[in-house]
Amino acid sequence: MTESIGQEFMRRTCYAELSDSPEELGIVPQPPLELPLPQGVTGIALPDPAEIQVPALELRTAIAERRTLRKYSEAALTLDELAYLLWATQGVKKVTSRPVTLRTVPSAGARHAFETYLLVNRVEGLTPGLYRYLAIENQIGRLPAPENINELLTEASLQQSQVATSAVTFFWAAVVDRMFWRYVERGYRYLLLDAGHVCENLALAAEQLSCGICPIAAYDDEKANRTLGLDGKSQFVIYVASMGKKIQ
Ligand SMILES: Cc1cc2nc3c(=O)[nH]c(=O)nc-3n(C[C@H](O)[C@H](O)[C@H](O)COP(=O)(O)O)c2cc1C
């Protein structure tokens, strides 16, 4: 029987199949821990996560109550709430001397190979548009984007209306080099695994804020990457999640 692409991927990403990594070969330095904002984009400081007040919620309750939510109230998030969700999903707790970032989510080899893009529709104090999180600096930057960015990203998400009506939709992009440098082809597995942790933290933290999320993997890769300015090879959208306040 011929081997399927999926079967081939699993076989060829077994340890025995892997070539020496750029790290082992010592020819390429470790890629940067995060991507800078594009030239001309100024970072907007976010509230300090340690200072943000959120309602107490037992972890057991958050786990029990979490369910995928595709319809949201029209209420906006506060900037504190957005900052809290960014901290819960990618917040940097420490930059070590190696250097690597230690964050609120685990990551294979602490590679933390994601950048977070945000389609902001309703957040107090933010102009709707496209933003990116700078995890180390705890800032966001508004990226140049067409006026109909909501429409474009909804279309890229196969017209799933929960993107259009979300308060915010998270688009996580993988920066392949950051993972590949240590794990070569096997790193693609780890990117996929890492993404799951990030989205689950979003789901649980959202519960605390009376919000719900919809994890989204049904999107048009080409359109999503093009709209975010990613080449689809060295960087690509790996996971999406829409979110907003629950309808009371
Ligand atoms: C990897 C993954 C991809 C998903 N993609 C979509 C999607 O594109 N659109 C959607 O409406 N729901 C999507 N979902 C949500 C699932 O449909 C949902 O988790 C499932 O029906 C179970 O419901 P629950 O989350 O409320 O427990 C996705 C969930 C996961 C984990």
Image: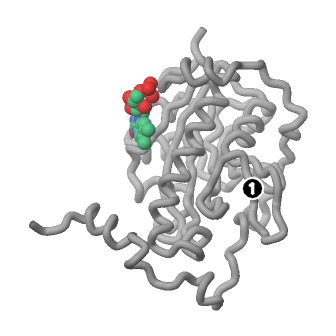
User: Which residue is nearer to you in this view: 194 or 148?
Assistant: 194
* Residue 160 in sight from this viewpoint: no
Q: Quadrant of the C terminus?
A: top right
Q: Tell me: is circle 1 under 8 Å from ligand 1.
A: no
What residue is drawn where x is 41% and y is 59%?
A: 222
Judged from the image, the quadrant occupied by ligand 1 is: top left
Say above or below: 48 vs 146: above
Answer left or right for 229 relative to 15.
Answer: right
Q: Which residue position holds label 1?
A: 102
Q: Position of residue 69 (x, y in %)?
A: 50, 24
Which amino acid lies under the numbered mark 1 shown in the image of this protein? Leu
Say above or below: 87 vs 107: above
Q: Quadrant of residue 29 in the image?
A: bottom right
Q: Position of residue 175 (x, y in %)?
A: 58, 65
What residue is drawn where x is 54% and y is 35%?
A: 242
Q: Position of residue 82 (x, y in %)?
A: 73, 35
- Which residue sits furthest front? 16
What residue is drawn where x is 86% and y is 47%?
A: 45
